[in-house]
Image (tube, helix red, strand yellow):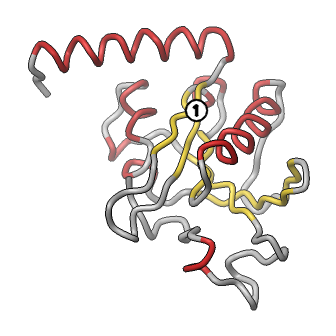
Amino acid sequence: MTHDPQTTAWLDQEDAHLAAVIRRARYAVQYVGPGERPDEPAFGYTIGLFGLGSPELVVVGRGSAATHTLLDAVAADVVAGRSVVPGELLEVGREELVVEECPNPGEVLLGANRWYRRPAEYSVPACVLTWASPVGCFPWDPGWDGGRYGQPRPGTWTA
């Protein structure tokens, strides 16, 4: 894809910043605010864990601070050598998370695929960290109110 000179310069600056963050911390967090349509949730994902032999991690439907907190906690464990496995229950502070495979990472991890120079059809893999509601329900539990909590199921939304 060819860009105009101004866009190319901006992308070069973004790439340099991302490289510095990944060099320092081994990963970065990309946060994407909510879209204009209700089916475009806010989400965040890691960039860099794939280079450590792990899938990238995704959190959907949370604000920037909570997304960064959850991703930073789990990514730090991955950097320290821990593996995350789909189906696993994780605890981060008072939060419970279930690791689920992301079935459409090429439609979600745009920045990570750009970083690794991979087309969407050969996307880096990802796992979604699915979080429990304030009353402890997961999306598959009775009492879950998906509209209220804004956490769509993996594979049902795109970036």
* Crowdedness near tag 1: few (<14), some (14–19) or many (≥20) residues, C-alpha within 10 Å: many
* Closest to the observer, 35 or 139: 35
Relative height, residue 84 to residue 49 (above, below) = below
**In the rendering, at what x and y percent does residue 75 appear?**
73, 34
Q: Quadrant of residue 131?
A: bottom right
Q: Residue at x 35, y 11 (%)?
A: 13
Instruction: Specify the quadrant that holds the N terminus.
Output: top left
In the displayed structure, does residue 48 sit left or right of residue 42? Answer: right
Q: Secondary structure at mark 1?
A: strand
Q: Is residue 47 above or below residue 67?
A: above
Q: x, y (%) of residue 157?
A: 42, 65
Residue 152 position (above or below residue 17): below
Q: Which residue corresponds to the image point at 57% horizontal and 60% vertical from the top-left?
A: 61
Residue 36 horizontal/vertical position (percent): 32, 61
In the displayed structure, would residue 9 be above or below residue 101? above
Question: Label 1 amino acid?
Answer: Val
Q: Quadrant of residue 141?
A: bottom right
Side (left or right) of 48 relative to 35: right
Residue 3 drawn at (x, y percent)? 12, 22
The residue at 74%/40% (across/down) is: 69
User: Residue at 20% across / 15% down in the picture?
Assistant: 8
- Residue with the mark numbered 1: 29
